Image (cartoon, helix red, strand yellow):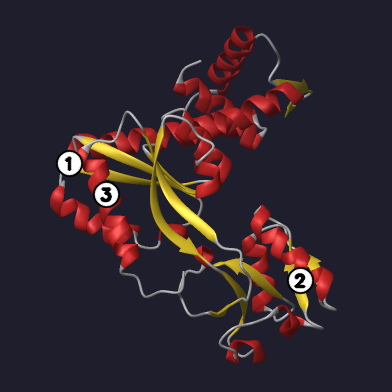
Amino acid sequence: MNTKQMDYIIETAKTLNLSRAAENLFISQPALSYQIKVIEEEVGFAIFDRVGKSIRLTPAGQQLVTSLQRISVDLQFAIEQAQNMGEIYTDSIKIGFASRSALYYLPQAMKLFEQMHPDVQIVPEIQAPNDSLTAFLHKELDLILLPKQEAQKLSNVVIHPLYISQIYLLCQQTDPLAQLDRVTAQDLAGRTLLVNGGSSQTLRQVQQRVLSTVPIHYFNSPTHDFTLIQVASDKAICLSPGYLNDHSGVFAWIPFDCPESFDLVLVSHQDQLNPALANLIALLQELYDQSKLNL
């Protein structure tokens, strides 16, 4: 199946109407129907069921379309990055991390890095932690940000210390808790605490200790974005690692009294630590060493 045929399948799946799909693709309907038949013969299963003049995806077709959509996005990204390389750069460094705030100083590091290596492009890859780790293990990423305990499980890598992130109480700026210099578990009595969701094992440990020692309500949150909405609507408060703070000032982040913290490190492949990559790591380390932010 070539890329044009991928487009035929994806567009037809979007419209579930051969006439409209053919019009959107600027080909005739008979030509589109023929191409779909050729593709179905190639893959060995029906992608669409024909019901009178209507069509619908088969279960196998639905799975195929989902995969093709992901491949199409990845392919477009790869083409765009290759175009960038061809125009300006001779090499690239791909760095994976879970959220923009987790590498808050990356933009500054990129500016400084460009003065040292104008022909090397830095490509940020913001992905879910498991996706980043998989890409790194397949050597699709040159550098990845990880908790130290996770990095120590990997082999044939070099671990570069970066920063330690504390745990904070996240609430509205107008919340009475925002006036405290440091929040204890007892300060949370009677409040509603958002828990679980994408929380790490370390954060869940702190949450559970609070729930077991203080009279407090709790509410399950599936994601950090869901948590932010709940806090913004004054429905709850939460405990969060400092690396999720975007430092926009929208919310109050008050240090929480607990011994747990997050030791964040950069990880590179043992056999791929070239001078440019070493310089990028050194720049990030220097920026974090000099940081006055609450991390």
Tell me what residue is drawn at x 75 percent, y 21 percent: 50
- Where is residue 21? Give x, y as percent: 57, 32
Q: CA distance from mark 1 to mark 3?
A: 19 Å
Tell me what residue is drawn at x 64 percent, y 78 percent: 232
Q: CA distance from mark 2 to mark 1?
A: 53 Å
Residue 129 relative to residue 155: left or right: right
- Where is residue 244? Give x, y as percent: 53, 64
| Camera sees residue 246 | yes
Q: Which mark is residue 280?
A: 3
Residue tagged 1: 88
Q: Which residue is situated farthest in the front direction here?
A: 259
Dot in front, 1 or 3: 3
Q: Quadrant of residue 142?
A: top left
How packed is label 3: few (under 14 Cα within 10 Å), some, or many (20 or more)?
many
- Where is residue 275? Give x, y as percent: 20, 40
Tell me what residue is drawn at x 54 percent, y 59 percent: 262
Residue tagged 2: 210
Element carrying mark 3: helix
Lower sequence index among marks 3 and 2: 2
Q: CA distance from mark 3 to mark 2?
A: 39 Å
Lower sequence index among marks 1 and 3: 1
Element carrying mark 2: helix
Which amino acid type corresponds to the residue marked 3 in the rendered image?
A: Leu
> As displayed, is residue 118 above or below residue 68?
below
Q: Which mark is residue 239?
A: none
How packed is label 2: few (under 14 Cα within 10 Å), some, or many (20 or more)?
some
Q: Quadrant of residue 189?
A: bottom right
Which amino acid type corresponds to the residue marked 1 in the rendered image?
A: Ile
Which amino acid type corresponds to the residue marked 2 in the rendered image?
A: Val
Q: Nearer the viewer, residue 27 or 274?
A: 274
Residue 294 relative to residue 21: left or right: left
